Amino acid sequence: MNTKLHAICDSQGCPLNLFATAGQVSDYIGARALLSSLPKVGWLLGDRGYDADWFRKALQDKGIRPCIPGRKQRKTTVKYDKRRYKQRNRIEIMFGRLKD
């Protein structure tokens, strides 16, 4: 059995909150679990696994702009800031450090 680790990180890539789920569970479960603990921020960077209309709406209700690319099977394309999305590498580096 494997697990997935969902994280809320600051702009420097330092983890603020972590949540583990079973590996076969959808990313939506982690998103729903961490939604209430999101700090006051302007943007949220996330990968395609977090692309859901309900999640985008929940972020906007909190005053957070989502920077999440749309899933490939999405019928309507989603606009996101590609330049800002490149900063997500800080999160990937954080996960790499945790694995080490």
Image (cartoon, helix red, strand yellow):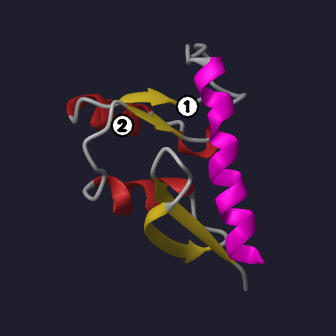
- Classify the position of the C terminus by image quarter: bottom right
Mark 1 surroundings: few (<14), some (14-19) or many (≥20) residues within 10 A: many
Would you place residue 66 above or below residue 20 in this image?
above
x and y, in percent, of residue 61 in the image: 21, 31
Q: What range of the chain is rendered magenta?
A: 82-100
Task: Report the disc number at residue 88.
Answer: none
Locate residue 32 relative to residue 26 in the image: left or right.
left
Q: Residue at x 49, y 44 (%)?
A: 11
The spot of residue 29 in percent (x, y) is: 45, 61
- Identity, as a three-letter code, of the amino acid under mark 1: Ile
Q: Is residue 11 visible?
A: yes
**Closest to the observer: 59 or 9?**
9
Which image quadrant is residue 22 in?
Answer: bottom right
- Mark 1 and mark 2 residues within 8 Å of each other at the beta carbon: no
Does residue 76 sit above or below 59 in this rendering?
above
Q: Which of the pair 12/89 is nearer the observer? A: 12
Residue under the point 38% across and 39% down: 55
86 in magenta: yes
The percent coordinates of residue 30 (x first, y second) are: 46, 61
Marker disc for residue 68: 1
At 36% across and 37% down in the image, what residue appears? 54
Q: Secondary structure at mark 2?
A: helix
- Looking at the picture, does residue 15 appear above or below residue 48? below
Q: Can the viewer see residue 70 in this picture?
A: no
The kind of residue tagged 2 is: Trp
According to the image, label 2 marks what residue?
Answer: 54
Tell how many labels: 2
